[in-house]
């Protein structure tokens, strides 16, 4: 299977999807797949949710675009909902997570500039972190493999070891404009930040005049069992970035800003032509209202615990091939030992009608729709156990 008109910058699986329904995708031959990666943590309410589809259709008949030169609905409504629910003062809308992180980086530097601290322009990030593919967000990403061939990248970035409290004291100084961290790293193989690490990071940022940015692009919007990841870990940042699940598949990103820094970006400092598109914002508003009716946070905690227990049971039963699982809520990783490969396990699962992701070199990544049922979790766990056991037996021969 090939699409020669598409740029070959993705390693696409040989399957073409034509529709979706809840936690399932359907290919062109009519085969159904349990989607345990949800478009990389995007379709939190599943595929083709009828209420979101209706909200998008209604809005598209009224107003698709008017630009950010004017006020328009429903972006204003969405900003009010997000600030009310989070306690932050202002929202900025863009189209993706990488753009939200770019906005946060610019705001942090501009805030220091407006205070007269012209040398406070370093953004401190952490090993294993991933913040996007644009040049600025890529510069904040520690992994050098993502950067090969794209030099020179923007300057003014530094890195410290993730979850290393002792390293923070030397890493944050009077040149640090902000620290950016994922409460749970996804791309590197699902690594949760320790709460004591985040508390110390918060303390040092406050003490030394640096902003704290939480990148909740993948781990936010209920994936950890609370609407915002900062609520799950008990540490409040100055800025947070979000995208992916916000529009349940419609392209929208957001940066939420604490009141102390709400005036840092003034007209002309930053913008986005399509940011807060009425259609995408309508989808995001519908998403927020639907999750309230479903009591989604309690559900995520229940099914997430079931999934973690199941993965742990696999690790206990097959310790030669997989390690103890990592993660929180419904963002989970199962590290795979050599000689097995996570990519090969994911391919065999796909042949069985189950879609999972990979990350961090050799980790299975699970991020199913938040509406996934206990029965579907059990199906997923049983399939992973069967594939790992089968591949392990073949490898042993």
Image (cartoon, grey):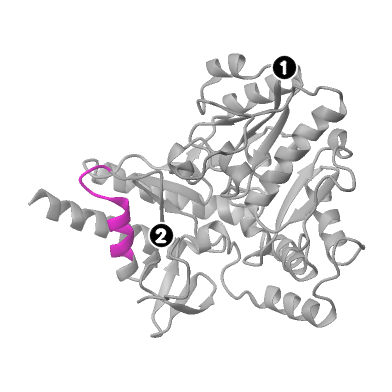
Q: CA distance from mark 1 to mark 2?
A: 43 Å
216 above or below 209? below
Is residue 118 or residue 307 the one in the foreground?
118
Task: Please report the bounds of the magenta region as a residue range.
Answer: 337-349
Q: Give residue 153's mark.
A: none
Which SS does the magenta portion mostly show?
helix
Quarter assignment of residue 248: bottom right
Q: Who's the residue at 77% across and 21% down the image? A: 209
Q: Residues within 10 Å of mark 1 (few under 14, many from 20)?
A: few
**Place of residue 141 in the rendered image (x, y in percent of width and height, measured from the top left):** 54, 38
Residue 115 locus on image (x, y percent): 87, 25
Q: Is residue 295 above or below residue 250?
A: above
- Residue 226, horizontal then vertical, whole percent: 65, 48
Element at label 1? loop
Residue placed under numbered mark 2 in the picture: 356
Q: List the single residue furthest toward the right.
A: 70
Outermost residue toward the left? Answer: 397
Furthest residue to the front? 152
Callout 1–callout 2 Cβ contact below 8 Å: no
Q: Is residue 347 magenta?
A: yes
Q: Nearer the viewer, residue 113 or 204?
A: 113
- Could you tell me which secondary element the residue under label 2 belongs to? loop
The answer to which image quadrant residue 114 occupies is: top right
Residue found 63% across the figure and 21% down from its top: 200
Q: Can see residue 81?
A: yes
Quarter of the rendering containing residue 79: bottom right
Say whether residue 190 is visible: no
What residue is pinned by disc 1?
A: 174
In this view, the mark in front (1 or 2): 1
Q: The N terminus is located in which quarter?
A: bottom left
């Amino acid at each position: 299977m090939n699409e020669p008109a598409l740029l070959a910058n993705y390693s696409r699986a040989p399957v073409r999807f034509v529709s979706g329904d809840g936690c399932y995708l359907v290919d062109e031959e009519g085969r159904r797949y349990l989607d345990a990666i949800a478009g990389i943590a995007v379709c939190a309410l599943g595929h083709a949710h009828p209420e979101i589809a209706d909200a998008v259709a209604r809005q598209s008949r009224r107003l698709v675009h008017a630009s950010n030169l004017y006020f328009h609905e429903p972006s204003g409504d969405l900003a009010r909902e997000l600030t009310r629910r989070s306690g932050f003062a202002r929202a900025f809308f863009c189209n993706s997570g990488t753009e939200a992180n770019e906005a946060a980086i610019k705001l942090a530097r501009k805030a220091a500039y407006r205070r007269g601290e012209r040398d406070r322009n370093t953004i401190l990030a952490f090993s294993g972190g991933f913040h996007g593919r644009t040049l600025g967000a890529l510069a904040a990403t520690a992994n050098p493999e993502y950067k090969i061939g794209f030099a020179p990248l923007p300057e003014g970035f530094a890195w410290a070891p993730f979850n290393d409290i002792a390293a923070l004291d030397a890493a944050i100084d009077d040149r640090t404009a902000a620290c950016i961290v994922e409460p749970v790293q996804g791309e590197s193989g699902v690594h949760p930040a320790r709460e004591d690490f985040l508390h110390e990071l918060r303390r040092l940022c406050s003490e030394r005049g640096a902003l704290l940015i939480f990148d909740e692009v993948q781990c936010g919007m209920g994936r950890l069992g609370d609407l915002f990841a900062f609520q799950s870990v008990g540490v409040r940042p100055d800025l947070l970035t979000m995208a992916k699940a916000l529009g349940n598949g419609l392209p929208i990103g957001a940066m939420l800003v604490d009141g102390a820094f709400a005036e840092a970006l003034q007209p002309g400092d930053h913008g986005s032509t399509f940011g807060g598109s009425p259609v995408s914002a309508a989808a995001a508003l519908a998403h927020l209202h639907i999750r309230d009716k479903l009591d989604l946070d309690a559900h995520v905690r229940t099914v997430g615990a079931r999934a973690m227990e199941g993965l742990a049971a696999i690790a206990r039963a097959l310790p030669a091939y997989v390690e103890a699982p990592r993660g929180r809520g419904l963002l989970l990783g199962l590290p795979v030992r050599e000689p097995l490969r996570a990519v090969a396990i994911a391919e065999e699962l796909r042949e069985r009608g189950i879609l999972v992701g990979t990350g961090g070199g050799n980790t299975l990544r699970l991020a199913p729709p938040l509406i996934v049922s206990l029965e579907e979790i059990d199906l997923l766990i049983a399939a992973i156990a069967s594939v790992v056991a089968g591949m392990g037996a073949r490898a042993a021969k």
